[in-house]
Image (spheres, rainbow, N blue to C red):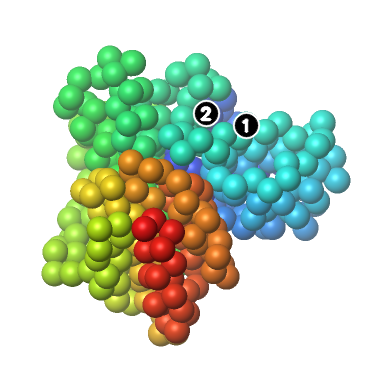
Amino acid sequence: MHYDIFNGDADGIIALLQLRLAEPRESVLITGVKRDINLLNQVIELNNVSSVTALDISMEKNLSALNNLLDKQIPVFYCDHHRTGVIPTSDKLDSLIDLDAETCTSLLINNKLNGQSAKWAVAAAFGDNLYTSAEKLAQEIGLNETDTLFLKELGTLINYNGYGSSLNDLHIEPAKLYRMLLDYPCPHQLKTDKSSPYYILKTGYATDYENIRLLAPISNNNNTCVYELPCEAWARRISGVFGNELANQSPDKAHAVLTLNANGQDYTVSVRAPLNNRTGADEVCTLFPTGGGRKAAAGINQLSISSKSKFIDTLSSFYG
């Protein structure tokens, strides 16, 4: 049996969507909330795995499981733009990796497929906050401003849906959302279908965003800005997209959004490097346990409350 393993955010979902629109294939889907990236571990003990596609999950975080699959002579196609660690050498591994801060998995798949579903790739790039790359591709394929703005909103909404501490926080489970989106070879079809997931996510986002308007940063200087969100489902859902919005509003600053976890002892952290200097987010986050990500955007799954000041100081120092 083939397994499609993918991140539950816009980039992961749309990367797989492009592949399966071009190459339909019966498969078992493995995904989760955006932060759930150790997904290859879910297949290494299974006996029915004939091949694997892995999309938009850090190879570095899945290296042990990947080596296990390759040792079993299971073919793996791996496409990603996050930290890799040492890429295994195996004739069973087909890897498409690019760590450039201006690309994402869906853009890599778009190139691989020679633009067969390029509109979807535009939406994914917007969802991953790669506005320059998204707008460039939109221009290349001749999209007008109205259609481009819709793809920007759609990508943002799909990405927004991936944030949460568990699937219960999400409006639509990522595997289900992927299956729903397969019915729309052209993303603009979602706008004309009033029952499409676009409208479900649009309503949820508008409701959650009302809570953001009341917030003020807990730290703000010339180089960095940090917000703290409460332990609420709306906060977990909005955190990542809110971080992207802050980055776009102040492109010379680094931003962090800390969301209190249910245990009351630590935070989930989203970090965005300055848009005008898309580097270092992963370096900052990996200084703390459970931290990781890529140059432009990274995070920490469990930052202890006692480490909050140290994190803020580290962020300010790095970008100072």
- Provide the secondary structure element on which disc 2 rests: helix
User: For the C terminus, which image quadrant?
Assistant: bottom left
Look at 13% across and 69% down and name the residue there: 214
x and y, in percent, of residue 191 in the image: 22, 34
Within the image, what quadrant is residue 70 found in?
Answer: top right
Taking 50 as reference, is 23 above or below it? above
- Horizontal side of 191 relative to 163 (left or right) equals left
Residue of label 1: 96
Amino acid bearing label 2: Ile
Q: Which residue is mark 2?
A: 109
Q: Residue at x 73, y 41 (%)?
A: 87
Secondary element at tag 1: strand
Point out residue 99 in the picture as x, y percentages from the top left corner: 55, 38
Horizontal side of 273 relative to 57 (left or right) equals left
Is residue 95 among the parts visible in the rendering?
Answer: yes
Residue type highlighted by circle 1:
Leu
Residue 75, percent from left and from top? 76, 36
For the residues bearing labels 2 and 1, Cβ distance under 8 angstroms: yes
Q: Residue at x 43, y 71 (%)?
A: 311
State the quadrant of the N terminus. top right
Most foreground residue, 292 or 188: 292
